[in-house]
Image (spheres, rainbow, N blue to C red):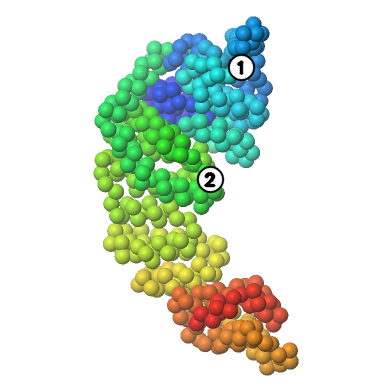
Amino acid sequence: MKTLLLNRLMHGYEELEPVILGLMAMDKSFILIGRHGTGKTKLAKSLSRGFGESSFVFYDATKDDLISIAGIPDPESIKIGKLRFIGHERSIWDKTVIVVDEITRASKENQNLWLEILEERTCFGIPLKYRSIIATANPESYAAAFQLDEALLDRFYAVIPVPEMQSGINSYDIKKMVNLSMKIGDSVTHDEIIRIFSEIKSAHKDLIKENALEKVERYLGEIIPPILEMLKDQNNQYMSPRSYCHILPEVILAIAAYFKVIGAAEPLRDGAEQALKYSVATRLRANPLAIEQHHKAASILLRGGTMKTGEKLRMDLCTINDTEAQLAYITNNWSSMIAELTKDELEKTIRKIYKEINESKNNKALLIMQAVLSNVGYSGDILRQVKGQLNASLFKARRKLLPVIQKYLLTDTNELLGVMKEKILLLESLLKDSKFITDAHSGLVLSKTLIMNISDKYDKPGVNDILNEISMIEFETIKEL
């Protein structure tokens, strides 16, 4: 990929250039995730020269308080009912690039202070001049403790993991890093950074004139609803309307402006791909592969096209995480899937569902899968595997449970009455019927699930185990035959 300047500042950061330069040029704030010594502060300080030679300030979120950030409250202004501060060389008032180190470890009080600074661009109601805030965090504090307040996180436009250069590096990498670290002076000039930022801003204006926002709106209209469902299913993660209606479109356009400057063929598509990566996947810790699949399906809208049925199907299928919901989708959309997807795509989808069911050891889902695939007319290898697995499990359950039930019924002196008597007799009749074992009808799912679950739960089930299990089941569950 063609680069503009990051490779002359930090080795290994080339892939991050579009998001970092795009966001900084458009005055957006973001978080860099990486361990100490990976160059986060050096990068921020170098790029800050695009906003003025003396515009950079560094704060430690765990130590710096109101006085070190804003200064001392001026007692004279307080006397007349106003709050003003007596500033100092590190105070925030005249800075344009602010680095906040260890933002995830800031106290609640400090996080509230930074929330106002980010949201309102004020400090205690007094306007600030900054252009961009770059926060940093250690990977463990972000992923494990995750102490950053959700409202504060929601004010950052992206979360960007930086390269740590610990594996896969070679002698060239070391030579390059030593050279960049030890050189006197900087190969990137103040004027060059200003020029690049100006070019990105100009490209952003051109995108707006070219109706890029309308394309982005259509794109987000298709891609956001399934992503919200995916986030909810995966870890009940919340993505605010501010994130997908304000932050995400701005990030797409900012990064797209960078790609327009370097002459990319499809800057909106490239911008959207990186925006989803850093403003959704890493920011909300969502599944990056699923996010990428959503983008591939909907990216045609960024070219001014129309999403076709096949693309919509692909996006839906990678959105649904619950296996039973996936099988229901196949039932309702099988004819479209046959018409729009390739044979390999169909087989891959079905194999993925089968694998997830096996990993979860979900007997009910496996039975539903057999019924669904049989009903839609699928005749591939996965159905043969499902049938073989289920038949083996059900015959095993039959050998385990039927002798115990029959012996109990022959020797019972307790005179089971009512519903329990009917349940045990019906269970016996089901296990004796070989057609029950092999029939894939969906109406048998609940009774077969009951039988398989009892068999799996007990290595050598006794009659009391069986009676206890069926006592907790509604009579209609095993009467469905």
Give the residue displayed 34% in from the left and 46% down from the top.
298
Element class at badge 1: helix
Q: Tell me residue 266's x, y (percent).
A: 29, 36
Amino acid type shown at disc 2 = Gln
Question: Label 2 crowding class (10 Å Cα cut-off): few <14, some 14-19, many 20+?
Answer: some
Give the residue displayed 51% in from the left and 49% down from the top.
232
Give the residue displayed 51% in from the left and 37% down from the top.
283
Q: Name the residue carrying label 2.
A: 237
Q: Quadrant of residue 258?
A: top left
Q: Tell me residue 159's x, y (percent).
A: 50, 33
Q: Quadrant of residue 91?
A: top right
Q: Outermost residue, top direction?
A: 76
Q: Is residue 350 left or right of residue 104?
A: left
Q: Quadrant of residue 327?
A: bottom left
Residue 254 visible, this orientation: yes
Q: Separation of disc 1 and disc 2 at Cα? A: 33 Å
Amino acid type shown at disc 1 = Ile
Q: Where 448 sits versus 258, above or below?
A: below
Q: Where 14 sits versus 338, above or below?
A: above
Element class at badge 2: loop
Give the residue displayed 54% in from the left and 13% down from the top.
93
Q: Name the residue carrying label 1.
A: 69
